[in-house]
Image (cartoon, helix red, strand yellow):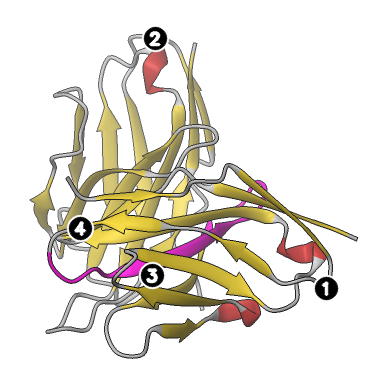
Amino acid sequence: AQSVAQPEDQVNVAEGNPLTVKCTYSVSGNPYLFWYVQYPNRGLQFLLKYITGDNLVKGSYGFEAEFNKSQTSFHLKKPSALVSDSALYFCAVRLTGKLIFGQGTTLQVKP
Amino acid sequence: GAGVSQSPRYKVTKRGQDVALRCDPISGHVSLYWYRQALGQGPEFLTYFNYEAQQDKSGLPNDRFSAERPEGSISTLTIQRTEQRDSAMYRCASSLIIEGDIFYEQYFGPGTRLTVT
């Protein structure tokens, strides 16, 4: 079955440090992968996507993600975290039109 | 420009009542999607449309749930005879239609918080 897993419920990082939010996927065929962010009491905002091409994808707010086919991973990264990055992050994979989401990872950036 | 809008933002209803949730997609977006999100969980697919045609309704939990998009723009998700387990955030998203290998991201609305008492 097509699925996405986010193995960490929460990630804690100090402001200014690099951050990584993990995502692994299981799909047949070429994966189309996405990251979304959800701030409290707000809708989901698109961050970035991987369709094809370069394995390192750059997105909004300084975030990037690395697609690794051999490890079936699509980890979200940022070189220097901000307190304002604290939010709920979702990885998703496209399956014939619809998106299949992971369970989400709460990122807490402390000053 | 204007994003995806949903109404109402909050809906409290009594068990057994019918509810209708509305979604107004971004202008020019051909595809429209409905998701349901439980607290602390990722959105779960319900159904989606290209233009007015319902392409996939495999995520609708049972026959109490239905959706329509009669003119290819605004969509309504209807839940009949609501039950407490229907309480959740219902989110709508829209995107440009897929063209070849170009897959456009989905833009989400603020959601409708449904509470069934």
Q: Position of residue A6 (x, y in %)?
A: 46, 49
Does residue B34 belong to the magenta stretch? no
Of tags 1 and 3, which is closer to the observer?
1
Of tags 4 and 3, which is closer to the observer?
4
Q: Is residue B73 above or below residue B21?
A: below
Q: As shown in the figure, which amino acid type bears the numbered disc 1?
A: Gly
Q: Position of residue A59 (x, y in %)?
A: 52, 81
- Look at the numbered disc 2 and give the secondary structure of its residue: loop
Chain at tag 2: B
Q: Are marks 2 and 4 on the same chain?
A: no
Q: Position of residue A18 (x, y in %)?
A: 71, 72
Where is mark 2, residue-wise?
A: B15
Residue that appears at 44% across and 23% down: B87
- Tell me, yes or no, whether the two marked residues, 4 and 1, touch with CB atoms within 8 Å: no
Q: As shown in the figure, which amino acid type bears the numbered disc 4?
A: Val
In the image, the segment drawn in magenta is: A29-44
Chain at tag 1: A
Where is mark 4, residue-wise?
A: A27
Where is mark 1, residue-wise?
A: A16
Q: CA distance from mark 4 to mark 1?
A: 35 Å
Q: Is residue A21 above or below residue A53?
A: above
Q: How many marks?
A: 4
Q: Are marks 1 and 3 on the same chain?
A: no
Chain at tag 4: A
Q: CA distance from mark 3 to mark 2?
A: 32 Å
Residue sitting nearer the eye, B89 or B52: B89
Q: As shown in the figure, which amino acid type bears the numbered disc 2?
A: Arg
What numbered label is drawn on residue B26? 3
Q: Earlier in the sequence, mark 3 or mark 2?
A: 2
Q: Position of residue A1 (x, y in %)?
A: 17, 45
Q: As shown in the figure, which amino acid type bears the numbered disc 3?
A: Ile
